[in-house]
């Protein structure tokens, strides 16, 4: 029995996962952090508080359902930072990483330190049966409320003790795609997080929409889209059109970023991950326009699956 435990306490989700590398089975428990109606998010102090309340509950649920005990865990991994970059830090990740350190010390098992972003990339590859890409160079997009990043992933450049090197080659210069979705969603009366409700509204619009994104090299700018959507809603009073317009701008921004990056670095596999990439409209349109892979929707939002999978690989 080879069981590996992953923990991820991101800004809006508490998540724990057990991965069996013999059967490739995943058992995961996760819970969104509570956000008051009309609010755009949480203060970090509130996020930390909610994680400390939710993490014990999820552990109880996980091991009640699991066919193993804590003593059967071979290694534990956690998200310690948002990104693998100098100065990348959010207090909410200290909850999960702290529990992982306690388990490692008390059970005398290895502890592995990952970034939240690395977990998303691993979840995307695992959920689409693309784990072989770990041995290749590929382009990974992580698109969420906290990031809109294009990442060049290269195993050969990884430092000792790391599985993969992640180099930022494109990003948003202002607003993240997930922030844009939530701001436009709240304007249209959706509840935070607004992704699913905004998608439902957008699916009601059936006419073609044109959008001209603001692109600077391999980077994008999204803050102006909020004003464009507000003006459109004030003019048309059409929630479906406004929602579809917002998503179209995100789609076009990602498409133009991808084209420019491929032109610069050459053809390579392309993987999209992160909560915004669970959107069926963006997913379907980009799949028709690019040769790319999307993380399965159930693994697109914040989760500990990728952390558990990475832990199993590094423990070899």
Image (cartoon, helix red, strand yellow):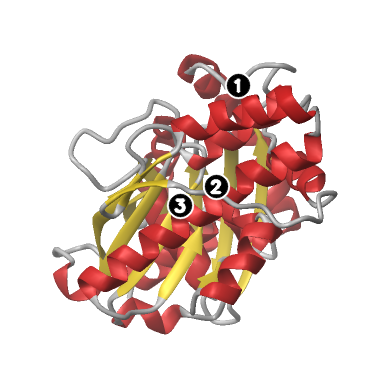
Question: What's the distance in space between the residues labelled 1 and 2, CA to CA?
Answer: 21 Å
Residue 194 location in percent, x, y?
69, 35
Q: Can you tell which mark lies on residue 249?
A: 2
Q: SS for tag 1?
A: loop
Residue at horizontal 81%, vertical 50%?
205
- Give the position of the N terminus as an image quadrant: bottom right
Look at the numbered discs 1 and 3 and tell me whether their residues touch, using CB distance below 8 Å.
Answer: no
Q: Which residue matches tag 1? A: 40
Bin the neighbour count of mark 3 within 10 Å (Cα to Cα): few under 14, some 14-19, many 20 and up: many
Q: Which residue matches tag 3? A: 253
Work out whether residue 78 or residue 227 is closer to the camera in this orientation and state it.
Answer: 227
Q: Is residue 153 left or right of residue 32?
A: left
Tell which circle, 1 or 2, labels the residue nearer the N-terminal end. Answer: 1
Tag nearer the camera, 1 or 3:
3
Residue 183 location in percent, x, y?
61, 27
Q: Is residue 95 left or right of residue 34?
A: left
Residue 163 location in percent, x, y?
28, 67
């Amino acid at each position: 029995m080879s069981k590996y435990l992953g923990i991820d306490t991101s800004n809006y989700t508490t998540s724990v996962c057990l991965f069996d590398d013999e059967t490739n089975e995943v058992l995961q428990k996760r819970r969104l952090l509570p956000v008051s109606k009309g609010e755009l998010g949480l203060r970090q102090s509130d996020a930390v508080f909610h994680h400390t309340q939710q993490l014990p509950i999820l552990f109880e649920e996980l091991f009640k359902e699991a066919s193993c005990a804590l003593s059967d865990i071979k290694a534990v991994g956690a998200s310690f930072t948002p990104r693998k970059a100098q100065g990348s830090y959010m207090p909410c990740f200290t909850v999960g990483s702290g529990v992982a350190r306690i388990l490692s010390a008390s059970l005398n098992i290895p502890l592995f330190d990952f970034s939240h972003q690395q977990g998303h990339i691993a979840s995307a590859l695992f959920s689409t049966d693309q784990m072989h890409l770990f041995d290749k160079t590929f382009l990974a997009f992580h698109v969420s409320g906290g990031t809109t990043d294009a990442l060049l992933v290269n195993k050969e450049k990884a430092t000792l003790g790391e599985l993969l090197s992640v180099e930022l080659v494109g990003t948003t210069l202002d607003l993240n795609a997930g922030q844009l979705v939530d701001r436009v969603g709240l304007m249209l009366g959706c509840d935070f997080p607004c992704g699913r409700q905004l998608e439902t509204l957008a699916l009601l619009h059936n006419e073609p929409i044109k959008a001209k994104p603001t692109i600077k090299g391999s980077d994008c700018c999204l803050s102006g889209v909020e004003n464009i959507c507000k003006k459109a809603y004030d003019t048309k009073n059409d929630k479906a059109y406004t929602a579809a317009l917002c998503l179209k701008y995100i789609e076009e921004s990602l498409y133009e970023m991808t084209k420019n990056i491929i032109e610069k670095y050459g053809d390579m596999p392309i993987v999209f991950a992160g909560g915004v990439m669970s959107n069926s409209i963006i997913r379907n349109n980009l799949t028709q326009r690019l040769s790319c892979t999307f993380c399965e929707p159930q693994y697109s939002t914040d989760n500990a699956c990728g952390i558990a999978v990475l832990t199993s690989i590094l423990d070899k």
